[in-house]
Image (cartoon, helix red, strand yellow):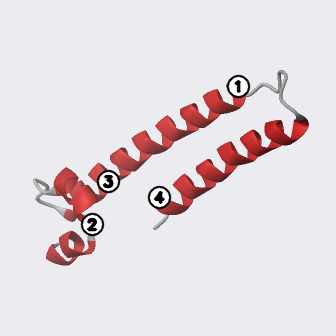
Amino acid sequence: MSALFYSLSMDVLHLVIDCQTSHCVWHTLEQAITSLSNSHIMQLHGSFLDIRQGDDSITIYVVTYNSITKHQFIIEFEMNF
């Protein structure tokens, strides 16, 4: 199990430091990631619901839309590594 601890970054090590088994480590990490993923999905959904063109040009509207999409892609990419 020490190899598992050594492979974790300091950002998540505090979540599993009290775990006695690798099952506990994996379960704890799964719960943390699932919670984070759900939070990001809800935030993204809200961002897409809030976007309005209003008086902005179509260019500004598309840039805003792309910015939200790019931000979500970066979050998903970071969570996979």
Q: Earlier in the sequence, mark 3 or mark 2?
A: 2
Of residue 10 and residue 32, the one placed in the foreground of this image is: 10
Q: Amino acid at mark 1?
A: Leu
Residue at numbered disc 2: 9
Q: Quadrant of the N terminus?
A: bottom left
Residue at numbered disc 3: 29
Spatial CA distance of label 2 from label 1 is: 35 Å
Residue at numbered disc 4: 79
Q: Secondary structure under badge 1?
A: helix
Spatial CA distance of label 1 from label 3 is: 30 Å
Q: Amino acid at mark 4?
A: Met
Residue 29 in the image: above or below residue 31: below
Q: Earlier in the sequence, mark 1 or mark 3?
A: 3
Q: Amino acid at mark 3?
A: Leu
At x 73%, y 40%, the residue is 64
Q: Secondary structure under badge 4?
A: helix
**Of marks 4 and 1, the one in the foreground:** 1
- Numbered label attached to residue 49: 1
Dividing the picture into quadrants, the one containing residue 5 is bottom left
Callouts 3 and 4 close, C-beta under 8 Å: no
Spatial CA distance of label 3 from label 2 is: 12 Å
Q: Earlier in the sequence, mark 2 or mark 1?
A: 2
Of residue 36 and residue 2, the one placed in the foreground of this image is: 36
Looking at this view, name the residue that lies furthest to the top: 54
| Label 4, residues with CA under 10 Å away: few <14, some 14-19, many ≥20 | few
Dividing the picture into quadrants, the one containing residue 19 is bottom left
